[in-house]
Image (cartoon, rainbow, N blue to C red):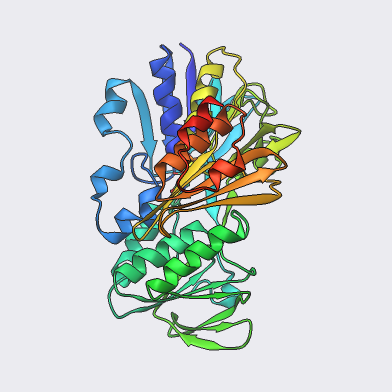
């Protein structure tokens, strides 16, 4: 019987094994995860779960019974330490497991602050896993002072939760503005205003010089302009790096992640990759996405291809972020945009449309599901939107879909 092994029991791994069974794979399936818990959704970690609004059980993608019913062997709590692509085996602890086909869904690792600048002090947290958030949550209480390092989506979401729980929050962003890497100035401005209305102090264009501590515990921070602030805990949200160490050791080609072809196959014909860890051909270059929709869609595409399919993976990117009472929904990829068309509703309901020349590339919609939905449909179908209609908040967007 053929044996498919999947390394990484996160969003992509769980989607991949489920899809194999759904499509009728009758061989053996083993899903191996380093974390000691069943595959779970990460987005609530910096949102409802950290806020205390979501129970642990609701984080899990599937109940334990699902894996048993589907005859999927799940091994948790131990990382795979080696792959032998010639002998076609993987090593977990003392066990060596043979595979016919292997998929890597190893996700990504959060960037941490170096110990030399206090990154190893107690009270310094990253937000990647359940263990990180469970360790941080007891500190996120009224009256504490938090420093958030990094003004990307994770840092801003953590700031929103902390502020809601009564923490005095300072956020430092080294770049000129928050969200600089991922969004237009208009979106940065919107979220800066939102946070300052909730009492979060956002400092842009200034980085962290170093953290200081007493008895191994963080007590303060010195910023790059030599100013000092007192803190009780620190949240580091300075990005992630794809988890490629295992693939590198196995000799697989790496290019901003584990390099795959359009089908999701790596440089080894029996090894596949999907999710945060994988970079795939896109237009004239390569792309690696860090999102739940990508993890699911790519993993499902790879599962079908592992069973003999020949479907190229074509992403239809979308993303979301929750901060206070604002739901941001993003459709498309804004890379290469040259101008923005704003649709200014009532101040809370706003959307920003990214264009390159006459072509619509992406939409950031705040509390505006209709703008998001219309924008997504247009972008997925390679269509554009008349800026005159987009910019008029009184104009109905739906006719754009028929244009
Ligand atoms: C706090 C937070 C909030 C987020 N919010 C959003 C959001 O709002 N919207 C959105 O679209 N995306 C969001 N994301 C991103 C999204 O969660 C990820 O893109 C998605 O989880 C990627 O899935 P994945 O399976 O590739 O990786 P992961 O879900 O990270 O799973 C990878 C798994 O592989 C395991 N692993 C790694 N190496 C080994 C090994 N050697 N052996 C065994 N197991 C191994 C890891 O321990 C991990 O459990 C968020 C992420 C975080 C951390």
Looking at the picture, tell me which residue is in the foreground, 347 or 375. 347
Looking at the picture, tell me which residue is in the foreground, 360 or 213. 360
Q: Is residue 251 left or right of residue 149?
A: right
**For the point 49% across and 62% down, which residue is it?**
190
The answer to whether residue 186 is above or below residue 273 is below
Whole-percent x, y for residue 86 in the image = 66, 25
Whole-percent x, y for residue 153 in the image = 49, 57
Q: Is residue 93 visible?
A: no
Whole-percent x, y for residue 283 in the image = 72, 32
- For the image, the number of numbered tags is 0
Looking at the picture, tell me which residue is in the foreground, 42 or 379. 379
The answer to whether residue 24 is above or below residue 171 is above
Quadrant of the frame with the C terminus: top right
**For the point 44% across and 35% down, which residue is it?**
32
Q: Is residue 67 visible?
A: yes
Looking at the picture, tell me which residue is in the foreground, 145 or 401. 401
Considering every residue shown, the one lying at the far right of the view is 284
Whole-percent x, y for residue 59 in the image = 30, 44
Q: Is residue 236 left or right of residue 145?
A: right
**For the point 40% across and 72% down, which residue is it?**
197
Quadrant of the frame with the N terminus: top left
Rendered image quadrant of residue 323? bottom left
């Amino acid at each position: 019987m053929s044996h498919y092994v999947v390394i990484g029991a996160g969003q992509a791994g769980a989607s991949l094994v489920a899809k194999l069974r759904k499509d009728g794979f009758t061989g053996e399936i083993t899903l191996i995860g380093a974390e000691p818990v069943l595959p779970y959704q990460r987005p609530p970690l910096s949102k409802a779960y950290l806020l205390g609004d979501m129970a642990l059980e609701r984080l899990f993608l599937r109940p334990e019974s699902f894996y048993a019913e589907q005859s999927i062997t799940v091994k948790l709590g131990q990382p795979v330490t080696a792959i032998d692509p010639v002998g076609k085996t993987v090593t977990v602890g003392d066990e060596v497991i043979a595979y016919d086909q292997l998929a890597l869904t190893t996700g990504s690792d959060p960037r941490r602050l170096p110990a030399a600048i206090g990154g190893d002090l107690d009270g310094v947290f990253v937000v990647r896993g359940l263990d990180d958030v469970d360790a941080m949550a007891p500190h996120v209480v009224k009256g504490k002072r938090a420093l958030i390092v990094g003004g990307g989506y994770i840092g801003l979401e953590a700031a929103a939760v902390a502020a809601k729980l009564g923490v005095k929050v300072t956020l430092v962003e080294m770049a000129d503005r928050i969200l600089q890497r991922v969004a237009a100035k208009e979106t940065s401005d919107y979220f800066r205003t939102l946070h300052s209305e909730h009492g979060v102090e956002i400092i842009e264009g200034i980085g962290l010089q170093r953290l200081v501590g007493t008895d191994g515990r963080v007590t303060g921070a010195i910023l790059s302009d030599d100013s000092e602030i007192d803190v009780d805990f620190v949240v580091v949200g300075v990005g992630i790096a794809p988890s490629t160490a295992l693939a590198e050791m196995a000799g697989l080609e790496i290019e901003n992640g584990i390099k795959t072809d359009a089908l999701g196959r790596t440089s080894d014909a029996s090894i596949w990759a999907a999710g945060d860890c994988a970079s795939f051909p896109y237009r004239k270059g390569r792309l690696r996405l860090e999102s739940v929709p990508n993890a699911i869609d790519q993993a499902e595409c790879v599962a079908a291809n592992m069973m003999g399919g020949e479907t190229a993976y074509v992403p239809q990117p979308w993303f979301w972020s929750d901060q206070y009472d604002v739901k941001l929904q993003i459709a498309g990829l804004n890379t290469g945009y040259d101008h923005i068309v704003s649709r200014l509703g009532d101040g809370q309901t706003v959307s920003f449309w990214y264009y390159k020349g006459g072509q619509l590339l992406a939409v950031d919609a705040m509390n505006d599901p209709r703008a998001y939905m219309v924008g997504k449909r247009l972008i997925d179908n390679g269509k554009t939107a008349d800026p005159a209609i987009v910019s008029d908040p009184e104009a109905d967007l739906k006719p754009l879909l028929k244009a």
